[in-house]
Amino acid sequence: MSTSIDDLIFVAFNHHVLGMNRIDGTVVWRNSKIPRGYISLMLDGDRLMVSSSGYMYCLDPATGKELWNNPLRGFGTGPTAMVSVRGQSSQNSTTQAAASIDTARTAAAAH
């Protein structure tokens, strides 16, 4: 049975990244190939971006399978800040929903 990424939370520590069931806490998948160090995570749509010790990894968030990696030589090794236009916060979702309602009201008023 396949698990939807909507059913998962992602946890990282030491050199492990885990996909866990958000309802019961069971580990669905584990990737232990990440270098030890502070691990940053960012869910970018259908990609889970992982950074640790100067390395970047792209994982499939449903399986934990590595899709690519880049050692980013020469850029340093501290904690990483990541940003993506594909990610959404609940505030963005609320704003988008409000904009959709306003658009629908405007269209209805025009008829």
Image (cartoon, helix red, strand yellow):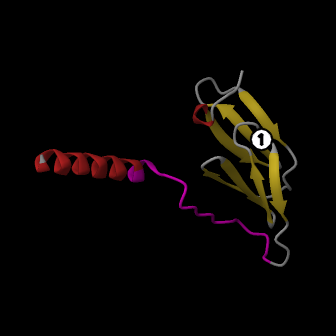
Relative placement, left or right, of 105 versus 36 is left
The image position of residue 77, as x and y in percent, is 79, 70
Residue at mark 1: 64
Q: Is residue 106 above or below residue 11?
A: below
Relative placement, left or right, of 47 versus 100 is right
Relative depth, front residue between 54 and 100: 100
Tell me the amino acid under the disc marked 1: Gly
Relative depth, front residue between 32 and 85: 85
Q: Residue at x 84, y 52 (%)?
A: 34
Q: Is residue 85 inside the magenta stretch?
A: yes
The image position of residue 80, as x and y in percent, is 68, 65
The image position of residue 40, as x and y in percent, is 69, 57
Name, please, the residue furthest toward the front: 111
Relative placement, left or right, of 10 versus 37 is left
Q: Is residue 104 above or below residue 63?
A: below
Q: Residue at x 68, y 49 (%)?
A: 47
Give the image quarter of residue 51.
bottom right
Q: Residue at x 79, y 75 (%)?
A: 76
Q: Is residue 4 above or below residue 102?
A: above
Give, as a single range, the part of the protein colored magenta: 75-92
Q: Is residue 54 above or below residue 21?
A: below
